[in-house]
Image (cartoon, rainbow, N blue to C red):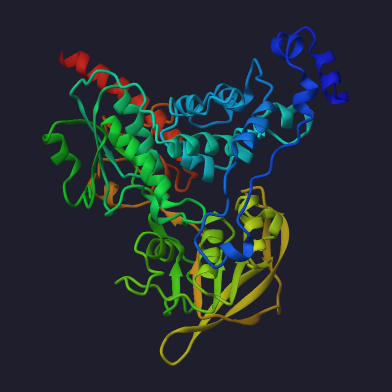
């Protein structure tokens, strides 16, 4: 037994925290297993194509990794999961070689396991709460890798399971937006027997999963399979339907919908409002990624091309910035740059995404901030003035505040700039429902326990409430909202019945 584990057991001897560990599990066998590494596509190959970077675990690799799980009596990893997956249960199924049953366990609480296994920041959520991290100061069980493995195994087996559905009750509920929060609501409500319709403004289902995340991180076919599973459960989807334009919430009420979930996201890009920002060749990350991911702009044969030059600068340090700059590299940029006003250590992007970007030859220009853009005679951006920064005292975010260094300005040649400094909530639904209470930031105010808005029967979650969130946090909002809608309808039906 390792010295650290022995010390901890000695301290906790009087607490029945891990009967299995004390009695039957050979703890040293498990704790001595080194965390597995995810196989990856070669950086040279992947930087020139849209092939998926992470390749997934093989069966033996997954079973070995699953053996690391100590099956804690009080599994703190679950508390770190916004959708409440029974993590030890699904991992034990993998250890036993029952991969299909592991997928069944995942889908009890997660409508999109193959998606979450790829894009969720497990390192700051479930894995951060793992016993290995909390008590042993070791690398956590690779929960995200195992979730992806189970979901992929089920899909590749051709034996997709459909969760148990309650008897249909005939009560209609509407989900506005088919992003992760809306799909989570749909998945729970259909299980409870409701008649669920998802209304999507665009021509494809998936929201940010489709238009915002590149195929090299999340292939569209993965999203499509998850959505098809929801269809098999009975969820109905309406595309090219803009609630607030095509029909109002009141119109839908007249059609018999009893409750509504608003998951319309944050589709308005933020800009820095510096001189020259309207020149040709300067995009928001939303427009750039949507054109490439959803409109096939990388293909010259399509009607919605996007200009992506040879010297591309992406402003920002989050996951969207990484997605944008790596996309530009794949579209043929000779020089793809990240320009971020803070240090590398303070970047909000996932460590894995930064690592992958560096491996692919992305240039990181940290502690720099753009001041002005310059254009040629045709109005096409040709260069930018950049100022060097230094870090001061921490600001309200807890990160050290960037401070301009006087006299440090210099010019960088660029022919494409992608601004990825955040987004603001989509105002369409709020503007069509003036009775909704909104925050100063344009987000919908909700009861944090039920996710119900100031309008009875109208619930909301994801970016339209948070202003910006990860996929899994949006899904957590969706599950909480579904529970709130369920209780609201039960009370409403009881009063009317």
Towards the viewer: 354 or 104: 104
Vertical placement of 402 versus 334: above or below?
Answer: above
Q: Position of residue 292 (x, y in %)?
A: 41, 64
Left or right of 363 on screen, residue 445:
left
Q: Position of residue 306 (x, y in %)?
A: 39, 73
Towards the viewer: 382 or 307: 307
Q: Quadrant of the N terminus?
A: top right
The image quadrant that residue 458 belongs to is top left
Residue visible at 70% across and 26% down in the picture: 131
Q: Quadrant of the C terminus?
A: top left
Vertical placement of 488 versus 411: above or below?
Answer: above
Q: Residue furthest bottom?
A: 377
* Residue 258 in view here: yes
Towards the viewer: 275 or 246: 246
Residue visible at 29% across and 33% down in the picture: 232
Residue visible at 39% across and 61% down in the picture: 290
Q: Residue furthest right?
A: 3
Towards the viewer: 396 or 17: 17
* Residue 472 in view here: no
Vertical placement of 263 versus 138: above or below?
Answer: below
Left or right of 201 on screen, residue 65:
right
Left or right of 171 on screen, residue 188:
right
Q: Position of residue 313 (x, y in %)?
A: 56, 72
The image quadrant that residue 42 belongs to is bottom right
Vertical placement of 425 versus 83: above or below?
Answer: below
């Amino acid at each position: 037994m390792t010295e650290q584990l022995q010390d901890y057991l000695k301290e906790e001897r009087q607490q029945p925290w891990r009967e299995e560990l004390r009695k039957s599990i050979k703890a040293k066998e498990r704790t001595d297993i080194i965390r597995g590494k995810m196989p990856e596509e070669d950086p040279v190959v992947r930087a020139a194509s849209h092939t998926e970077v992470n390749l997934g675990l093989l069966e033996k690799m997954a079973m070995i990794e699953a053996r690391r799980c100590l099956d804690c009596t009080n599994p703190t990893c679950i508390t770190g999961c916004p959708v409440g997956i029974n993590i030890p249960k699904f991992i034990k199924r993998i250890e036993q070689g029952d991969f299909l049953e592991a997928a069944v366990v995942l889908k009890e609480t997660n409508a999109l396991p193959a998606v979450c296994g790829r894009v969720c920041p497990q390192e700051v959520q479930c894995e951060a709460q793992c016993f290995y991290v909390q008590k042993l100061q070791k690398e956590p069980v690779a929960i995200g890798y195992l979730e992806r493995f189970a979901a992929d195994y089920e899909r590749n087996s051709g034996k997709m399971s459909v969760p148990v559905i309650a008897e249909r009750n005939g009560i209609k509920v509407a989900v506005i937006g088919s992003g992760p929060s809306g799909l989570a609501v749909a998945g729970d409500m259909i299980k409870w027997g409701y008649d669920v319709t998802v209304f999507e403004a665009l021509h494809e289902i998936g929201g940010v999963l489709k238009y915002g995340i590149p195929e090299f991180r999340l292939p569209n076919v993965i999203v499509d399979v998850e959505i098809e599973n929801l269809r098999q459960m009975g969820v109905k989807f309406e595309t090219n339907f803009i609630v607030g334009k095509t029909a109002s919430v009141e119109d839908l009420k007249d059609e018999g919908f009893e409750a509504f979930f608003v998951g319309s996201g944050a589709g308005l890009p933020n800009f820095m409002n510096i001189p020259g920002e309207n020149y040709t060749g300067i995009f928001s990350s939303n427009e750039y990624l949507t054109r490439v991911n959803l409109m096939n702009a990388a293909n010259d044969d399509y009607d919605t091309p996007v200009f992506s030059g040879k010297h591309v600068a992406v402003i920002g340090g989050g996951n969207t910035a990484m997605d944008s700059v790596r996309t530009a590299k794949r579209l043929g940029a000779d020089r793809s740059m990240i320009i971020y006003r803070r240090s590398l250590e303070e970047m909000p992007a996932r460590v894995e995404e930064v690592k992958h970007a560096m491996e692919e030859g992305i240039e990181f220009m940290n502690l720099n901030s753009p001041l002005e853009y310059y254009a040629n005679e045709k109005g096409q951006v040709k260069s930018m003035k950049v100022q060097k920064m230094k870090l001061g005292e921490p600001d309200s975010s807890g990160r050290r505040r960037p401070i301009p260094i006087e006299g440090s300005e210099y010019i960088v040649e660029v022919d494409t700039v992608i601004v990825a400094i955040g987004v603001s909530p989509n105002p369409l639904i709020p503007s069509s429902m003036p009775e909704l209470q909104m925050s100063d930031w344009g987000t919908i105010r909700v009861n944090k326990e039920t996710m119900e808005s100031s309008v009875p029967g109208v619930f909301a979650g994801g970016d339209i409430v948070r202003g910006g969130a990860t996929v899994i946090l949006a899904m957590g909002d969706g599950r909480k909202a579904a529970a709130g809608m369920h209780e609201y309808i039960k009370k409403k039906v009881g009063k009317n019945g």
